[in-house]
Image: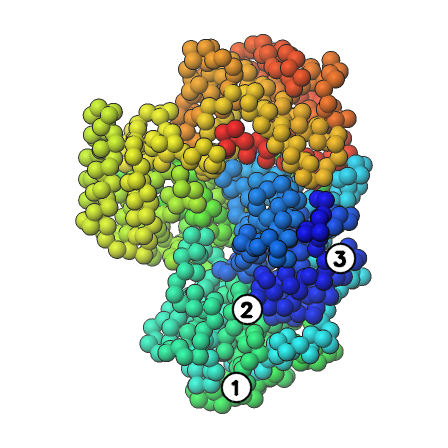
């Protein structure tokens, strides 16, 4: 960017930038840290107490990125910031902070500091959007893609598992074909900021090792762009000699920061662990007593109750919610995203986040898990917390009087279980036991049996004073190692392991799981993603797995309907095992041992059947035994099983779960008109289900029997009936189908034709097996807008052939120019820009195969033969998975045959002629980019040959015609050596970035229909 006088940014303007965005001036440590990074180019670890705004690293990074681009010094500020926590969050403060920054940049005036920052970021990313704020989710398709451009400035909030697994090419709950893209975006041009990093130390070291391997790349422009790491913790660092940044006397004297540092938090101990049989029940009873003791001394009407497990939090909520003198709300982190968003919109939660005022009629009691330890900006006037490790208690105390305005902020630490041979403290074990012993020597303690609330109230004012200024003295001479969870054993990332991880297609067998490198050797495997569907029925008491799989293909899962659960707890749930569900919201905690199979014959417990996604075969397969449940998989349960409510995971089988499968973020997503699905969204009444079934059956019968011209009136009549008062009783989720049905009612025309969906026409899909069910797909979005339908992924042979019919030359040119634009925005050297542009021109030339063209014409061979020029896009409906499979079958195109294999053959033949066309300096790179542009060829393409070979004539970037024999497609045995050499030349993450640049360009153009 050539800066003009109007664009120049000065470091002195950082305080004005913060004032414009946040409405206040930065703390002294924040300004000092910004200058330290700008002058030294090093992101020092932050040793900053809780409550002093560590999330401001987002503002610091954003300002420095814009300053760097506007002033033109060496590129040391990465284009992406990953803000990582180790807990399942109900509120993600980093994400909300980034969204507020994104809005401020978007709405800023041109002459303000924020406006100049926004202008610099737009120029840097080559986009109309200055900053993207992304909350990372799992997914196996294009709709789960979290960035559209590798050059887009972005803040991505995520967990240790979400970021770490993607960094090492093994993204949890993602498609193997999408993993190189995730790895590139996580491992290149990225800053990793880990909050409360004492628990996430393995991730810090693994990320540092990955950056070191990237630095060994022989290509100088990519060697130094590996991920940078910063720890936001006073107790964790990758290595002892890393520089740290701390508060100074200026912060202690600051009128706002000083009050927070001197908060009057008084800590009292309550022992309720005697003769305990049920830890959750004991915690609930003790918490109720502690609440009674706190209420008389609260200076603001809001208090928190924090448990170690979801089960204990729910037990306390169940008990406290029966009271009429307080309002209660439950916050846990293991919930579906859509449920989380709805809970956050609840009046009690919005009041909590805005700040509870002193005039509230009844105190608000918030019952929660570790989810409130980080990521949520709330301030309690009183706190009840279950005994935990020292670090966890410090974090929880950080939610108590965050502003330092109260004269007394009492906290009760209660022990509901003791560590012994017969029992253990859930989640924290011996660390919590040692912490309790340490606190007993310094804080007043009372014992539960015979205790009344008034006695406990009397001890609160004399509690131990714990704040950031007193804590160091309380820990002087103390071995804090035993007060916290033991530092995990962290395996070393060897070069051979990196080489193995980069092989994503095919994945090596056996394959090294990433979990030990994210949490340490003694850790739980990755969670299972669970979702519920109401249209998975049984026939004669047995599951119809074929029908279940068909229905999952019709409406694929989306991120907003899933929740992450430990595999062992899902097994316990499905087998109705009697053991307690001690699931917490802490990632990577040591699990209790599962009973593993032995050599002896054992009776395997019976399990309720489920459906599991096999990402290797792209199939939904039955799961009928406990050990069928694989960590890292996606599992679908019938909604009648229960296990989830409006607050999140329950672990109990009491009430059916609401099916949210029809409500992804895309407005053009399919909607199932199914009585069981719609009924669960409203009341669950059997009579209501019957009325819905009858109305749908009448409509489907008419759609089958009557003239196609009557389709629109029939669908309109059905929607009117469903929207009528007789079919719209109230329910906790009733607004979702009502809003969706109203949107569908606004569609002017409907068709049942397989290829009839347009910008004006919606599509009706009838179910051949169920007369009381149909699917409505809204019209396509207007031209120029993207359609991101769940289920469209690189695994399908026609994955990039959707949206509108587009000629192959037009698409090739569009992808070439988009890839070159991305590469230029990334400041790649001209040779690599040329290579990416040429790869974009040639990547789809193999689609000229006659049978592939037939598939793109919906299996119509006559139409394919009469085209003026070959197609790149079929125009088939992305939501019509059955129609796409039928087209491939009619064209006799095997699902594992890859058009990019023919493209790579053509490029190889073309390069043998030594063309004059600008293509960079690395022919091996060019062949690889073309072969790998759908995530295969890392290092091998699928070993599938053409059963009916033919000559395919491909047009190359210089318009030269190259003819290849499709009999030669299949395994390219030069691929592994080429792949290894390219990884050494560009680095593992550098090569993935080059692939990503081309693939994101291809996806963007495919979605836009250009």
Q: CA distance from mark 3 to mark 2?
A: 46 Å
Q: Which one is earlier in the sequence, the residue at label 3 or at label 2?
A: 3
Q: Position of residue 398 (x, y in %)?
A: 58, 72
Quarter holding residue 483: bottom right
Total marks in image:
3
Q: Which one is earlier in the sequence, the residue at label 1 or at label 3?
A: 3
Where residue 782 is drawn, which disc sits there? none
**Colour treatment of the image:** rainbow
Residue that numbered label 1 is attached to: 460
Name the secondary structure under disc 3: helix
Q: CA distance from mark 1 to mark 3?
A: 47 Å
- Specify whether residue 375 is in view: yes
Q: Position of residue 828 (x, y in %)?
A: 73, 37
- Specify whether residue 620 is in view: no
Q: Residue at x 73, y 23 (%)?
A: 918
Lateral position of residue 960 relative to residue 213, left or right: left
Circle 1: is it few (<14), some (14-19), or many (20+) Cα within 10 Å?
A: many
Residue that numbered label 3 is attached to: 38
Label 3 vs label 2, nearer the camera: 3
Q: Is residue 126 depicted above or below 524 in this figure?
A: above
Q: Is residue 842 depicted above or below 373 in this figure?
A: above
Q: Tell me if label 3 and label 2 are in contact, CB under 8 Å.
A: no
Q: Residue at x 65, y 19 (%)?
A: 957
Q: Position of residue 3 (x, y in %)?
A: 72, 47
Q: Which one is earlier in the sequence, the residue at label 1 or at label 2?
A: 2
Name the secondary structure under disc 1: helix
Q: Is residue 719 depicted above or below 729 in this figure?
A: above
Q: Residue at x 54, y 31 (%)?
A: 1005
Residue that numbered label 2 is attached to: 425
Name the secondary structure under disc 2: loop
Q: Position of residue 300 (x, y in %)?
A: 46, 79
């Amino acid at each position: 960017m050539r800066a003009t006088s109007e664009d120049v940014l000065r470091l002195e303007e950082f305080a004005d930038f913060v004032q414009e965005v946040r409405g206040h001036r930065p703390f002294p440590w924040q300004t000092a840290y910004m200058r330290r990074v700008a002058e030294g180019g090093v992101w020092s670890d932050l040793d900053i107490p809780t409550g002093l705004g560590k999330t401001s690293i987002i503002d610091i990074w954003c300002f420095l990125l814009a300053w760097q681009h506007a002033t033109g010094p060496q590129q040391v500020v990465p284009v992406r910031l990953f803000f990582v926590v180790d807990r399942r969050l109900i509120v993600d403060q980093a994400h909300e902070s980034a969204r507020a920054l994104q809005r401020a940049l978007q709405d800023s005036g041109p002459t303000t500091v924020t406006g100049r920052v926004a202008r610099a970021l737009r120029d840097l990313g080559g986009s109309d959007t200055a900053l993207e704020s992304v909350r990372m989710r799992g997914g196996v398709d294009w709709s789960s893609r979290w960035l559209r451009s590798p050059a887009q400035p972005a803040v991505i909030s995520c967990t240790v598992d979400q970021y770490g697994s993607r960094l090492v090419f093994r993204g949890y709950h993602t498609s193997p074909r999408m993993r190189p893209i995730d790895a590139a975006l996580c491992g290149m041009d990225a800053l990793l900021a880990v909050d409360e990093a004492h628990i996430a130390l393995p991730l810090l070291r693994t990320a540092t090792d990955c950056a070191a391997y990237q630095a060994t790349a022989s290509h100088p422009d990519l060697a130094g762009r590996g991920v940078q790491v910063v720890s936001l913790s006073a107790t964790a660092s990758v290595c002892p000699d890393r520089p740290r940044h701390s508060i100074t006397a200026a912060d202690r004297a600051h009128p706002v920061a000083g009050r927070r540092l001197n908060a009057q938090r008084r800590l009292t101990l309550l022992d309720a662990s005697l003769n305990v049989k049920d830890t959750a029940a004991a915690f609930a009873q003790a918490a109720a007593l502690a609440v009674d003791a706190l209420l008389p001394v609260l200076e603001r009407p809001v208090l928190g109750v924090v448990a170690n497990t979801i089960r204990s939090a729910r037990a306390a909520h169940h008990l406290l919610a029966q009271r009429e003198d307080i309002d209660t709300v439950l916050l846990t982190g293991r919930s579906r995203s859509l449920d989380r968003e709805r809970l956050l919109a609840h009046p009690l939660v919005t009041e909590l986040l805005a700040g509870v005022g002193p005039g509230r009629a009844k105190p608000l009691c918030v019952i929660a898990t570790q989810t409130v330890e980080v990521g949520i900006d709330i301030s309690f006037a009183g706190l009840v917390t279950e005994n935990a490790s020292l670090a966890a208690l410090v974090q929880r105390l950080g939610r108590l009087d965050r502003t330092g305005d109260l004269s007394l902020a009492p906290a009760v630490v209660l022990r509901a279980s003791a560590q012994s041979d017969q029992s253990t403290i859930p989640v924290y074990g011996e660390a919590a036991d040692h912490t309790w012993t340490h606190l007993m020597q310094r804080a007043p303690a009372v014992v539960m049996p015979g205790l009344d609330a008034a006695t406990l109230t009397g001890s609160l004012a004399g509690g131990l004073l714990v704040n950031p200024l007193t804590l160091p003295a309380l820990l002087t001479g103390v071995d804090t190692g035993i007060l916290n969870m033991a530092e995990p054993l962290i395996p070393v990332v060897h070069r051979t392991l990196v080489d193995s991880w980069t092989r994503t297609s095919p994945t090596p067998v056996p394959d090294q799981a990433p979990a030990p490198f994210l949490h340490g050797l003694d850790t739980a495997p990755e969670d299972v993603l669970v979702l519920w569907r109401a249209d998975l029925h049984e026939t004669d008491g047995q599951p119809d797995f074929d029908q279940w799989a068909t229905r999952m293909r019709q409406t694929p899962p989306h991120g907003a309907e899933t929740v992450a659960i430990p595999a062992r707890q899902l097994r316990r749930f499905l087998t109705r095992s009697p053991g307690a569900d001690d699931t917490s919201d802490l990632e990577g905690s040591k699990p209790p041992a599962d009973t593993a199979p032995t050599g002896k014959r054992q009776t395997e417990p019976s399990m309720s059947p489920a459906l599991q996604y096999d990402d290797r075969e792209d199939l939904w397969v039955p799961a009928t035994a406990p050990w069928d449940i694989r960590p890292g998989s996606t599992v679908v349960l019938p909604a009648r099983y229960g296990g989830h409510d409006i607050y999140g995971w329950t672990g109990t089988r009491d009430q059916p779960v609401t099916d949210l499968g029809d409500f992804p973020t895309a407005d053009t997503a399919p909607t199932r008109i199914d009585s069981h699905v719609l009924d669960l969204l409203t009341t669950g009444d059997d009579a209501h289900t019957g009325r819905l079934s009858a109305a749908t059956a009448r409509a489907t019968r008419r759609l089958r029997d009557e003239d196609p011209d009557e389709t629109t009136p029939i669908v309109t009549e059905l929607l009117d009936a469903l929207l009528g008062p007789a079919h719209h009783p109230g329910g906790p989720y009733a607004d979702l189908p009502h809003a969706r049905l109203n949107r569908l009612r606004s569609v002017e025309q409907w068709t049942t034709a397989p290829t009839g969906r347009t910008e004006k026409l919606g599509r009706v899909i009838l179910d051949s097996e169920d007369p009381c069910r149909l699917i409505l797909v809204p019209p396509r979005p207007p031209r120029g807008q993207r359609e991101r339908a769940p289920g469209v992924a690189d695994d399908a042979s026609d994955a990039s052939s959707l949206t509108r019919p587009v000629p192959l030359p037009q698409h090739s040119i569009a992808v070439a120019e988009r890839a070159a634009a991305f590469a230029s925005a990334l400041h790649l050297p001209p040779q690599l820009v040329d290579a990416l542009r040429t790869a974009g021109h040639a990547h789809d030339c193999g689609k000229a195969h006659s049978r592939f063209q037939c598939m793109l014409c919906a299996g119509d061979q006559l139409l394919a033969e009469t085209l003026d020029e070959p197609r790149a896009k079929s125009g088939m409906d992305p939501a019509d998975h059955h129609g796409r499979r039928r087209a491939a079958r009619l064209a006799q195109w095997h699902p594992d045959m890859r058009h990019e294999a023919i493209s790579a053959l053509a490029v190889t033949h073309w390069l043998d002629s030594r063309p004059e066309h600008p293509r960079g300096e690395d022919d091996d790179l060019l062949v690889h980019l073309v072969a790998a542009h759908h995530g295969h060829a890392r290092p091998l393409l699928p070993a599938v040959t053409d059963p009916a070979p033919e000559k395919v004539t491909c047009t190359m970037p210089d318009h030269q015609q190259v003819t290849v024999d499709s009999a030669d497609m299949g395994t390219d045995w030069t691929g592994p050596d080429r792949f290894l050499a390219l990884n050494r030349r560009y680095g593992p993450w550098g090569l993935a970035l080059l692939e990503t640049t081309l693939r994101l360009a291809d996806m963007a153009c495919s979605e836009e229909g250009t």
